[in-house]
Image (cartoon, grey):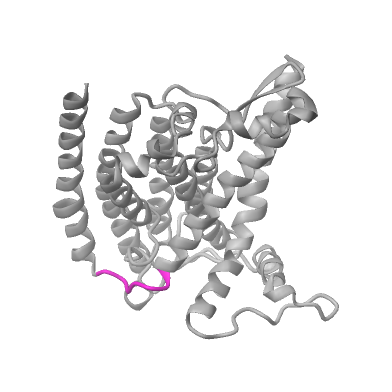
Amino acid sequence: MILELAITLVKIFFIIGVTVAFFAPILTWVERKQSAIMQDRVGANRADILGFTALGLFHAIADALKMFTKEDFIPQGANKILHTLSPIVAVVPAILTFAVIPFGGQYELWGESVNLVVSDLDVGLLFVFAIASLATYGYVIAGWASNNNWSLLGSMRTASQMISYEVTMGLTIIGVLMVYGTMKLTEIGAAQEDFLNWGFFLQPLGFFMFLAASIAENKRVPFDAPEAESELVAGYFTEYSGLKFGMFLMAEFIEMVTIGAIVTILFFGAWHIPFLPTATLLSWFDFLGTSGANLVVMFINVAVFFAKVVFFIWFQMTIRWTLPRFRYDQIMKLGWKILLPLSLANILVTGLVILAVH
């Protein structure tokens, strides 16, 4: 019992460390550097420690110090309690979704079965959607509590956009559930050991629709109408500064990691290496014994999983710095008139194919 608790705590600290302590700050640097490379610029390169700039990586530390020490300004007439609470409501669901996302398989280590997921729920995928949708309240509350017309307009856009694309996003993964017959993310990941059984090959249309809807849910370019600097100053977080402003940015970056992780689990083979079954990989390390071989394979699988996540983060960044912002009517049209009918058609076709095959 104590050992199981210790393993669970290690997994929790690992997830928090990877998402909050590593990805969240490093993505501020990635966003600057990738945009600079794409635009033929140098990018972040000024912050240094003893003359070393480390390719601009110290800018992430400088940003964190600035956020912690900057004045926390609350405008006159704002609701102080809700103004303070909303960034927390926005960032916590982004972290909680990782509780059910497996970052590896199941391994036998010194007589103990270790499953690399914090909580292996039977309705894991439903949990992700349920918790992620709670972030909407944080953005809506932020706009209303700021006592600012531009913030309120941004929060109204956020609410309508996230509700619209949550419907489509939910329907796009119904095909995946029909194919694999489970909502348990560990089972969906394990079912993709065979390269041809990856979700991308079984549900190609579902992948593209899910990715588009996920980016829209995260309000990233080209779906950043709720922020729309040229129209709404900064949207729902216009009246935010210091650490609370940083929490909104952190929520956005963590959601990018979440999107990459879910896409990897559902469509791109989870922690599996193409054309290399786990049994074959274990046989290569037989000389280390059962536990030793499992330990090495576990580290390899975790590395493969996060390598795929990093690829999808890069892909989202590429989209962010390539496409212009859609008009708000275009965003609504894409969600309700294009993606929604296509997702329903995808469910129908998937059902017909399953009936024909079985």
Apparent side of residue 349 relative to residue 224 in the rendered image (left or right): left
**Which residue appears at 55% of the width and 27% of the height?**
119
User: In the current view of this chain or complex, which residue is farthest to the bottom?
Assistant: 41
Say which of 323 and 199 sits in front.
199
Query: Magenta-highlighted stretch: main secondary structure?
Result: loop
Q: Is residue 264 visible?
A: yes
With respect to residue 225, does 277 lie above or below?
above
Seen in the picture, residue 279 relative to 143 is either above or below; the reply is: above
Q: Where residue 341 sits: x, y (%)? A: 14, 46
Residue 217 in picture, x, y percent from top left: 36, 52
> Quarter-wise, where is residue 322 in the image?
bottom left
Residue drawn at 32 percent across, 55 percent down: 212
For the residue pair 70 and 317, the one nearer the viewer reads as: 317
Foreground of the two, 16 or 241 = 16
- The image shows a total of numbered marks equal to 0
In the rendered view of the protein, which quadrant contains the C terminus?
A: top left
- Judge whether residue 323 is colored magenta: yes
Residue 26 percent location from the top left of the image? 63, 62
79 in relation to 37, above or below: above
Q: Where does the image place residue 342, in percent across and percent down from the top left?
A: 17, 47
What segment is highlighted magenta in the picture?
Answer: 320-326
Q: Is residue 48 left or right of residue 86?
A: right
217 displayed left or right of 277: left
209 lies above or below 33: above
Q: Is residue 84 visible?
A: no
Q: Quadrant of the N terminus?
A: top right
Whether the magenta-drawn stretch holds residue 206 is answered as no
Name the outermost residue toward the right: 50
Q: Residue at x 42, y 42 (%)?
A: 132
On the image, which quarter does residue 66 sit in? bottom right
